[in-house]
Image: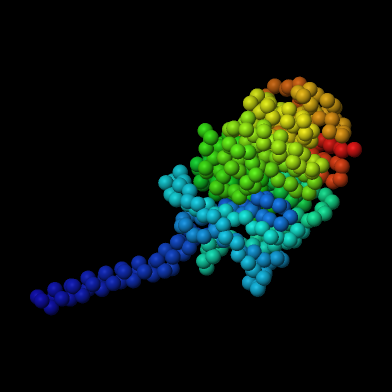
Amino acid sequence: MTKYRDWLWLAGAGLVLAAAWAGYTWWKDGGAAGAAGAAVPKSIVTTLAGDARTSRGFAWYTAEGQGPAVVQIAEGTGERVLQGSEVWSVSGVTTPVKTDRDEVQSSHQVNVTGLKPGTTYTYRVGSGAEGAWSEPAAFTTEGDAEGKLTFLNITDSQGQTEADFALWGQTLERAFTVFPDARFIVHNGDLTENPEDETAWDQFFGKAQPWLRGIPLMPVTGNHDEVDGEAGRFLPHFTLPANGAAGPAPGTSYSFDYGPVHIAVLNTESKIGEQADWLRRDLAGTDQPWKIVAMHRGAYGGNTYKKVLQWVPVLDEFQVDLVLQGHNHEYSRSYPLRGGQVTGSGNGPVVNRAGTVYVVTNASGAKFNEKKDDQFYHAVHFQNGKGMFAGITVEGRTLTYQAYDLDGRKLDEVVLQHQ
């Protein structure tokens, strides 16, 4: 009987050891891979956080962990340049973010400086640990004397489902087909429906990864990005200029230059009065020949958001050329305006800063609103029910704004000329 009990004990111990070995093998082969997978970067986006000629901002998320934020970078193209002797690493900031699934993910933000103008670089982001790097991607800094600049304007991707964000990705793909030389994107706000929905952020960035890893995305804060004065689930996804107005959350207002263009980004969701003072100082401080302002809720869009009309005298004072707007989910373009009055035709060129043109490039996702009533300032106003985008090209004394739909059809165009 004793020998039988001993046999049972040995058999049981063998089963425990077998189970332990199986568990170790699972952890080594699957569990460890899962842990490493949680550290693999996602939602990678590049931005213009400083001088576009010599710096580049990067941001990404990881599903778990508090690992370092590291960008590994080298001059040239191809994965092999990251294996050479000229590679260097730049560290940034990691911040924990509690998601709607009661998880803690990590936001990683890095600003790389000291780059050469007009130069292509290859980079990857991660923690520095093996198996926790992104795939390599490339970008090119602004050249010292680029004769022509094209950039994209797009707005209100505002999705909830993967299908919604698939449309956003398709709109962006068509935009780069029509404007393959676009150097950056201005997104006029409402990137997702609910900023606390991290799955939506995964899909927003995921459907656009082929472009956003190399082409800077400059976001405008919309009412679905900052809610009740809180933008804490929107801002950690981006590394943005730190030169905005005091009052609104840092990163929700800012300005930057690219080539001959100065762009000031405003936050229509909070501290509007403080931003009027900042906007005046910002526009007074630039000597760029072309001045553009971007905001979410429009002064002269499908309708008027009256709270931001206090910015209009500043736009008039500094003869801003173009105002990019969102929010209305319909297409509109104003006549040139000055002092709330129409100053020119909606058909011919706007010559010598005769007035500011205000545009809303419909939406880039699945949500389209019913067309609102026409207003005195509408030169063009319609609802086509399709994703839209615009390409803005500046060459010398001419700015050309062209609006297209998802099928690649040009639906509107206006030319601004400086004499």
- Residue 272 horizontal/vertical position (percent): 62, 31
Relative to residue 173, is residue 337 drawn left or right? right
Q: Residue at x 52, y 52 (%)?
A: 107
Left-right relation of 164 to 419: left
Look at 30% across and 71% down and name the residue there. Answer: 18
Horizontal side of 282 relative to 197 (left or right) equals right
Image quadrant where one finds the C terminus: top right
* Above or below 296: residue 102: below
Front-most of residues 149 and 240? 240
Q: Position of residue 312 (x, y in %)?
A: 72, 28
Image location of residue 179, percent across then percent down: 77, 48
Residue closest to the eye, 45 or 252: 252
Q: Say above or below: 258 vs 227.
A: below
Q: Count every numbered label the image shows and give the total.
A: 0
Q: Residue drawn at (75%, 38%), measured in percent from left and top?
A: 284
Side (left or right) of 416 relative to 300:
right
